[in-house]
Image (cartoon, rainbow, N blue to C red):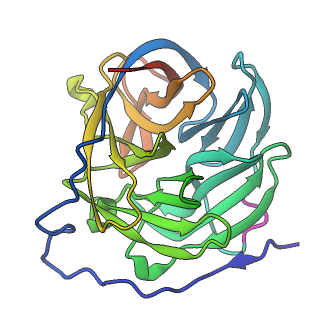
């Protein structure tokens, strides 16, 4: 039995060739503030793409898998065939989120930096079975999905794009209940190679693979305050990831609201070309996936 796909088409402004993604002025928000983050611990996991938390459990996405860990990071279960009920061909899960007992995943067909069949997939967090999917709106201009975040305050799903074209300069918003496309917001001076996304305390957080592991240069976490009426958003640097085990490739992000911790997934060891592992660095025979937990304190 196939899961029904819900699709919505809403007109959007087309990008004009040669113009920058944002206009000359971004929405300025002087109330945005930065937390202090202190590394608490790290844990090796079995997935390279995303991390999410809800009710004491941790959820990890690999490119083709979803796993669940208990509060002590013991593996509870893994789904290694998450694409069996899709109508359109897909082979890649990005960063995920969990809300009210359901796992939200940005899913697509991805090969050598090119994506197609973008959609939002919702899985049952207990059984890991696919519940429903929503196709993205092609008129949004989005060309890739690297992650999805649930924003319960604005009843929205937000998607980000890893693409280096103008698609990567926007955050895309969909209705949480119906899957209807609601529009997009441009990030002024958006970071490149966005990998993960999460909603926390009124802000969208994104991770960017903008460092250079070959030169021991770290990746970063950025954030912008949510304003559903704004067409442009101000992005600020939230954290430099200079305290991980070893520099590599940043991926997903989430927040443990009970312990007040930021969760970051990080990979090291694999050589990444156009978004895909292509062999290993010296000293590695496999890629290592870790989740770093940072305690949050207001400055």
Q: Residue at x 37, y 26 (%)?
A: 281
Q: Is residue 155 magenta?
A: no
Left or right: 136, with 208 as reference point:
right
Q: Is residue 219 visible?
A: no
Give the x, y percent position of residue 294: 46, 19
Picture quarter with the N terminus: bottom right
Q: Is residue 73 visible?
A: yes
Residue situated in front as seen by the camera: 168 or 237: 237
Q: Quadrant of residue 120?
A: bottom right
- The magenta segment is 82-86
Q: Is residue 85 magenta?
A: yes
Q: Residue at x 26, y 48 (%)?
A: 235
Left or right: 92, with 145 as reference point:
right
Give the x, y percent position of residue 68: 74, 33
Picture quarter with the C terminus: top left
Residue situated in front as seen by the camera: 265 or 154: 154
Give the x, y percent position of residue 50: 55, 40
Give the x, y percent position of residue 88: 66, 74
Above/below status of 256 relative to 28 = above
Residue situated in front as seen by the camera: 78 or 159: 159
């Amino acid at each position: 039995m196939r899961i029904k796909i819900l699709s919505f088409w809403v007109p959007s402004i087309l990008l004009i060739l040669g113009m920058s993604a944002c206009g000359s002025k971004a929405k300025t928000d002087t109330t945005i503030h930065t937390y202090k983050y202190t590394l608490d611990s790290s844990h090796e996991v079995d997935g390279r793409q995303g991390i999410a938390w809800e009710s004491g459990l941790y959820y990890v996405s690999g490119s083709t898998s979803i796993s669940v860990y208990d509060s002590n990071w013991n593996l509870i279960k893994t789904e290694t065939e998450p694409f069996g009920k899709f109508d359109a061909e897909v082979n890649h899960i990005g960063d995920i989120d969990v809300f009210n007992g359901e796992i939200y995943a940005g899913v697509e067909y991805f090969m050598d930096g090119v994506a197609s069949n973008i959609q939002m997939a919702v899985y049952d967090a207990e059984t890991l079975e696919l519940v429903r999917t929503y196709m993205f709106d092609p008129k949004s201009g989005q060309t890739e999905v690297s992650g999805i975040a649930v924003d319960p305050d604005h009843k929205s799903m937000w998607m980000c794009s890893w693409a280096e074209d103008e698609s990567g300069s926007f955050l895309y918003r969909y209705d949480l209940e119906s899957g209807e496309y609601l529009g997009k917001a441009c990030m002024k001076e958006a970071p490149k190679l966005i990998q993960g996304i999460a909603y926390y305390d009124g802000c969208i957080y994104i991770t960017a693979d903008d460092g250079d592991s070959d030169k021991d240069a770290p990746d970063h976490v950025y954030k912008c305050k949510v304003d559903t009426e704004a067409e442009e958003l101000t992005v600020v640097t939230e954290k430099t990831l200079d305290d991980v085990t070893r520099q590599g490739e940043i991926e997903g992000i989430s927040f443990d609201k009970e312990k007040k911790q930021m969760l970051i997934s990080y990979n090291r060891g694999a050589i990444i070309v156009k978004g895909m592992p292509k062999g290993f660095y010296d000293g590695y025979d496999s890629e290592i996936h870790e989740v770093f937990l940072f305690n949050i304190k207001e400055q």
